[in-house]
Image: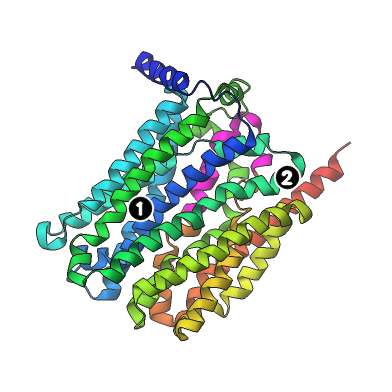
Amino acid sequence: MPHAAATADQDVGQFHSRHDQANPAEISIGVVIGRTSEFFDFFVYAIASVIVFPRLVFPHHDALTATLLSFSIFALAFIARPFGTAIFTAVDRRHGKGVKLIIALFLLGTSTVAIAFLPGYEDIGVFSAAFLAAARIGQGLAWGGAWDGLASLLAINSPPHKRGWYAMIPQLGAPLGLMVAAGLFAFFAGNLSADDFFSWGWRYPFFVAFAINVVALFARLRIVVTPDYARLFDTRDLHPAPVIKSIRHEGKNIAIGAFAPLASFALFHMVTVFPLSWVFLYTQENPARFLIIEAVGAVFGTAAIVASGLIADRVGRRSLLLSSAIAIAAYSGFAPQLLDAGIVGESIYMIVGFILLGLSFGQSSGAVASQFSKNYRYTSSALTADLAWLFGAGFAPLAALLLAANFGLISAGAYLLSGAVCTILAMMFIRSRNRDAQQAGP
């Protein structure tokens, strides 16, 4: 088996042998394509978890309960993701990056396309929920394995005075993936009858996700197997260290890194999944039209992510994260109520939210990556991302909807506020620790 795996990596390397330079421009393309495909998968499932799965899988519950149950399954991927990192890090160490990515993205594509064939409760009863949960766990494990280190490679190869600019490039995949997913669902929901949409229309985006995964796989392999990338492994700058050993040596930095971006990760779902669920459940707004509003908001988010790169290179990434966390805390106190203010209020909520999201999320990746030692940077960065998504985003739609349904929309901001407070405290701790380190220096 090791021999076969090594041969597979060699074959992939020979296929892409003409791509022998790991330059930032080429890496950026691979990063954006890979992240866009992952986020497209993510948003296709997220949208379906609001407008499809409650009716298909939990038809005998009231609409709110069915949506909460759907959000419970939604969270399973975030719980599974760290386990995927542990499993696929072992694969990476033993068989190489190419084999790891092929297996992870095959699992992701299989899990995603399996959902397209999901039978409903009326067909197989409670096994419909079990089938969906298994596919969702498969997606989470695959996302843990899909970590390819390209973002870290991009940071290592970026000019020192443009670190903020290159840090924002991987984050562009989120709004791009949302725009495509929202556009597809809006098209089918707006142009098909309800019967056709719930029978077959909602399944089509999951087939598209599978096709995009295939394209993304080759785009990422094109970079991962380059000699320059392999050379970084040899120098241990991006070496996949064992998970337990990484936690033992970098546990404190991993914890700080997980809490540092919580404001942006919590806001991420507060402007994507949660508002769609609230509008779908409690207003007369057409879901197709609201998906268009989300897509427009994502355009503003894309521009804000690009702006974050320019701003961060002027004022510093951590200063921008701290400032945006304070702005998100203020936003959490009044913005959710705008969802009950008609299309104008919804549009303001989405556009302002996406701008704040873009400024913070654009620099949230690797906020403390420089604190990791070289031997553990690769695995520690992956674990940091896993835990940040789990704590900041995994339960955000469930918590926000549960709070809003029982205590009103103003309470939905409490979850967002908690994320902003965590980011503020983490940034202040990092600043204090760096100041102490400088004072203790020679």
Label 2 belongs to which residue?
162
Badge nearest the viewer, 1 or 2: 2
User: At 44% from the left edge and 17% from the top edge, which residue is drawn?
Assistant: 10
The residue depicted at 62 percent of the width and 61 percent of the height is 304
Q: Residue at x 48, y 75 (%)?
A: 412
* Label 2 Cα crowd, 10 Å radius (few <14 / some 14-19 / many 20+): some
Identify the image quadrant of the N terminus: top left
Q: Residue furthest bottom?
A: 341
Q: Per the image, is 361 magenta?
A: no
Mark on residue 305? none
Residue 204, quarter of the rendered image: bottom left
Residue 336: x, y in percent?
Answer: 50, 78
- Residue at x 20%, y 51% (from the top left corner): 117
Q: Residue furthest left?
A: 123
- Compared across the picture, whether 106 is left or right of 150 comes to left
On screen, residue 372 versus residue 113, left or right, reads right
Q: How far apart are the alpha carbons under marks 1 and 2?
A: 37 Å
Q: Secondary structure at mark 2?
A: helix
Where residue 167 sits in the image (x, y, percent)?
64, 47
Answer above or below: position of 7 versus 413.
above
Determine which residue is flagged by label 1.
Answer: 76
Mark 1 element type: helix
The region drawn magenta spans: 369-389
